[in-house]
Image (cartoon, helix red, strand yellow):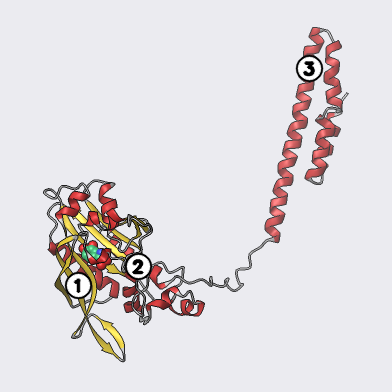
């Protein structure tokens, strides 16, 4: 016979989970008393067997319940002990802030994305390795255009079919081919040209903008850029002028200058009698729309492209473009940004 009371008492006295585990196999396992009793059932007549089986099942259930309850009790007291030991001392000084810094180019990309997202632009991206078609032909750039010259473009194959993109403009084509008008995107990204001096690096960053819809005019372009420049340089007034220019992918085309003055050798953006070119823009050429499967009779719009590194240099007073890409930790520590300060329009873009 199984002495149920004794078993349950022993279970309730178990000190830890290991002891409980041992009791469990002792009381319910293969060699347990109760198991032996179950085996004896076969020798009983049907009636007695039913009665005995039911009382054995009952006992087994009670032992199982006692073990389960005890397990829960031990588990709870373990957790409570842990909580007691791991108390948090709220008077301790805060942990040190992380050491890493955000590179000024990344910071400026985040700032620009925040500014344009406020007026409904989304961010698109494209690959650095591009086809000659997307980079030039689809953008209405003639075969003999100087930009196609080996001296300006890094070609990756003998046939000059694959290259490192020389601007972010091919993403205009990619975006329009993969969706339906209207489009309202900005495209930040790396671009490449054979060039290197204090203000040119073979790899640099551009930001493209494209807004295609019904009835878009140059007035929208002007309003958009006026808003952007004021937000970016965090000034209320800005002098800005559109100078007629030429790009194969826009008609008409313009370059935009902003006014500045020098104060103790530093560039102060906004007012003054000097002009600084910051971007190229225009109304997207109908041929570009056709190449990108957009009907120029129904849709039109503007595009612009600017150098991100240049904007970062201007805003944060950095003189040499090459220092951006030297990965000098002291430089990054000085010009870099706190990773926890994500730029947003409403909270402030920069320090
Ligand atoms: N892709 C031009 C460049 O790299 C910049 C540019 C000019 C982009 C006019 C445009 C544009 O989208 O409309 O110099």
Residue highlighted by disc 3: 53
Residue highlighted by disc 2: 205
Q: Quadrant of ligand 1?
A: bottom left
Taking depth in this image into account, of 18 and 209 the one nearest to the observer is 209
> For the view shown, which residue lies furthest in the front direction?
158
Residue 30 x, y percent position in the rendering? 83, 27
Q: Quadrant of residue 236?
A: bottom left
The mark nearer the N terminus, 3 or 2, is 3
Kindly identify which numbered label has been placed on residue 256.
1
Asked whether residue 346 appears in the rendered view, the answer is no
Taking depth in this image into account, of 162 and 91 the one nearest to the observer is 162
The mark nearer the N terminus, 1 or 2, is 2
Asked whether residue 63 appears in the rendered view, the answer is yes
Taking depth in this image into account, of 28 and 247 the one nearest to the observer is 247
Q: CA distance from mark 3 to mark 2?
A: 82 Å
Q: CA distance from mark 1 to mark 2?
A: 18 Å
Looking at the rendered image, the disc whose residue lies closer to the viewer, 3 or 1, is: 1
**Along the horizontal axis of the image, is 289 left or right of 331?**
left
Identify which residue is drawn at 31% across, 92% down.
264
Identify which residue is drawn at 78% across, 31% down.
63
Q: Secondary structure at mark 3?
A: helix
Q: CA distance from mark 3 to mark 1?
A: 94 Å
Q: Secondary structure at mark 1?
A: strand
């Amino acid at each position: 016979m199984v002495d149920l009371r004794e078993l349950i008492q022993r279970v309730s006295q178990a000190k830890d989970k290991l002891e409980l585990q041992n009791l469990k196999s002792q009381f319910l396992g293969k060699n347990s008393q109760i198991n032996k009793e179950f085996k004896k059932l076969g020798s009983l007549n049907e009636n007695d067997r039913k009665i005995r089986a039911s009382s054995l099942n009952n006992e087994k259930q009670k032992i199982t319940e006692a073990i389960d309850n005890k397990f829960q009790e031990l588990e709870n007291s373990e957790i409570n002990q842990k909580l007691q030991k791991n108390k948090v001392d709220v008077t301790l000084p805060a942990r040190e802030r992380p050491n890493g810094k955000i590179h000024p180019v990344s910071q400026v990309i985040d700032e620009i994305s925040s500014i344009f997202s406020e007026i409904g632009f989304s961010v698109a991206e494209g690959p650095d390795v591009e086809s000659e078609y997307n980079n030039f032909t689809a953008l209405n750039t003639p075969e003999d255009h100087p930009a196609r010259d080996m001296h300006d473009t890094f070609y990756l194959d003998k046939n000059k079919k694959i290259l490192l993109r020389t601007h972010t403009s091919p993403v205009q084509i990619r975006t329009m081919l993969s969706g339906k008008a209207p489009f309202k995107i900005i495209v930040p990204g790396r671009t490449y040209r054979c060039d290197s001096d204090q203000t040119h690096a073979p790899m640099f960053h551009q930001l493209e903008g494209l807004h295609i819809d019904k009835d878009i005019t140059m007035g929208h372009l002007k309003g958009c850029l006026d808003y952007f420049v004021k937000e970016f340089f965090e000034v209320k007034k800005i002098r800005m002028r559109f100078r007629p220019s030429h790009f194969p992918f826009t008609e008409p085309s313009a370059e935009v200058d902003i006014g500045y003055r020098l104060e103790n050798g530093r560039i102060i953006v906004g007012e003054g009698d000097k002009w600084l070119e910051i971007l190229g823009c225009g109304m997207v050429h109908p041929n570009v729309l056709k190449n990108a499967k957009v009907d120029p009779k129904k849709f039109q719009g503007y595009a612009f492209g600017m150098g991100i590194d240049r904007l970062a240099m201007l805003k944060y007073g950095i003189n040499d473009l090459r220092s951006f890409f030297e990965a000098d930790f002291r430089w990054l520590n000085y010009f870099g940004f706190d990773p926890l300060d994500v730029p947003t329009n409403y909270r402030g873009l920069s320090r």
